[in-house]
């Protein structure tokens, strides 16, 4: 639908506007939750630096995603509503770059999945070491282990690298694993007690009590089992991005045609509306 004197499609304009309002609100929500989690961590640990331990805090990942969605949504909303070519170009180009990065990452991730698993495993060992030092990280690890039914990164033995669970240390959690590794329905804090000790527990007893598979393999297995659902979500996200890019570029073309129409020289006898002749 176009106005009589306009080359700009109102349908595309407002579809793009509401499309971006939705993602702008999601970006605000994600950013707010991430900031709240970070501030709570700072208060609990008496930290005065917003960026201390940023590389181990999952809140920063969500904050980054939220800020990117907020900025793109804002540019898309204002660009569509105000018919601003500069903002629409920024939105379209940024979304195209993100789409390209996702596509390349997906292809490379599939082709080199074994190498990537090994690389991720080595890089994430610090998350095991710092399990007790960051509540956000601890909650993420516990959630992952319970959801994907796994323990540690490569195996449950990774918890030997944590000072609180290492068998060489004296303490209530010595030679144990976090409760999130346990298989029992009613989990208690010390359900994984002494499972790292071969002296106090056999392999059969250990496998009845905790998950022994590492989360790298556990997550990979979960993705393979839910490949259709994951693939459908990925295609849906990609389709939304393509629609956003197409709408933005179409709107830019409409605006340029309208500007060119306005810039055309008019004689005194040229009517503004051809239909009025």
Image (cartoon, rainbow, N blue to C red):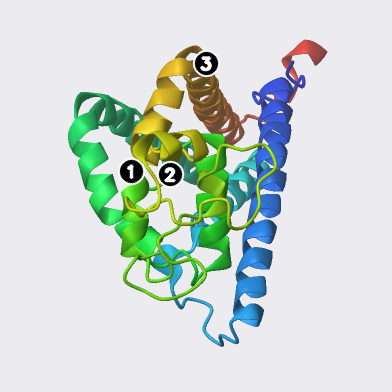
Pick the quarter of the image with the C terminus: top right
**In x, y percent, where is residue 43?**
66, 81
**In x, y percent, where is residue 126?**
33, 62
Q: Are marks 1 and 3 in contact (CB under 8 Å)?
A: no
Upstream in sequence: badge 1 or badge 3? 1
Secondary structure of the residue carrying numbered label 1: loop
**In x, y percent, where is residue 235?**
49, 18
Q: CA–CA distance between discs 1 and 3? A: 30 Å
Q: CA–CA distance between discs 1 and 2? A: 6 Å
Pick the quarter of the image with the N terminus: top right
Mark nearest the camera among 3 and 2 is 2
- Residue at the spot 40% in from the left edge and 47% down from the top edge: 201
- Residue at the spot 49% in from the left edge and 72% down from the top edge: 133
Q: Are marks 1 and 2 in contact (CB under 8 Å)?
A: yes
Dot 2 crowding, Cα within 10 Å, few <14, some 14–19, many 20+: many
> Which of the 4 image quarters holds residue 19?
top right
Residue hosting label 1: 155
**In x, y percent, where is residue 31?**
63, 57
Q: Which mark is residue 67?
A: none
Residue hosting label 3: 232
Secondary structure of the residue carrying numbered label 3: helix
Frontmost residue, 108 versus 189: 189
Secondary structure of the residue carrying numbered label 2: loop
Q: CA–CA distance between discs 3 and 2? A: 28 Å
Q: Is residue 277 visible?
A: no
- Residue at the spot 54% in from the left edge and 22% down from the top edge: 233
Q: Is residue 50 left or right of residue 105?
A: right
> Which of the 4 image quarters holds residue 251?
top right
> Which of the 4 image quarters holds residue 227?
top left
Residue hosting label 2: 151
């Amino acid at each position: 639908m176009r106005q009589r004197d306009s080359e700009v499609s109102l349908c595309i304009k407002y579809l793009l506007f509401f499309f971006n309002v939705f993602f702008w609100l999601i970006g605000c929500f994600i950013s707010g939750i991430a900031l709240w989690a970070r501030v709570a961590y700072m208060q609990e640990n008496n930290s005065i630096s917003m960026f201390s331990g940023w590389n181990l805090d999952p809140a920063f990942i969500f904050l980054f995603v939220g800020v990117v969605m907020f900025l793109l949504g804002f540019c898309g909303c204002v660009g569509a509503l105000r018919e601003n070519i500069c903002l629409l170009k920024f939105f379209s180009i940024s979304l195209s770059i993100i789409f390209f990065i996702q596509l390349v990452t997906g292809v490379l991730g599939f082709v080199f999945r074994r190498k990537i698993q090994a690389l991720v495993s080595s890089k994430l060992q610090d998350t095991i070491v710092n399990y007790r030092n960051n509540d956000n990280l601890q909650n993420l690890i516990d959630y992952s282990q319970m959801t994907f039914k796994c323990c540690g990164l490569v195996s449950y033995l990774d918890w030997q690298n944590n000072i609180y669970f290492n068998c060489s240390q004296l303490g209530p959690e010595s030679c144990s694993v976090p409760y999130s590794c346990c298989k029992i329905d009613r989990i208690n804090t010390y359900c994984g007690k002494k499972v790292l000790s071969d002296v106090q527990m056999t392999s059969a007893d250990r496998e009845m009590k905790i998950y022994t598979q590492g989360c790298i393999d556990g997550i990979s297995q979960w993705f393979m089992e839910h490949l259709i659902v994951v693939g459908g979500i990925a295609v849906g996200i990609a389709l939304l991005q393509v629609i956003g890019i197409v709408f933005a570029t179409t709107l830019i073309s409409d605006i340029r045609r309208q500007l060119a129409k306005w810039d055309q020289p008019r004689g005194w006898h040229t009517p503004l509306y051809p239909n009025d002749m």
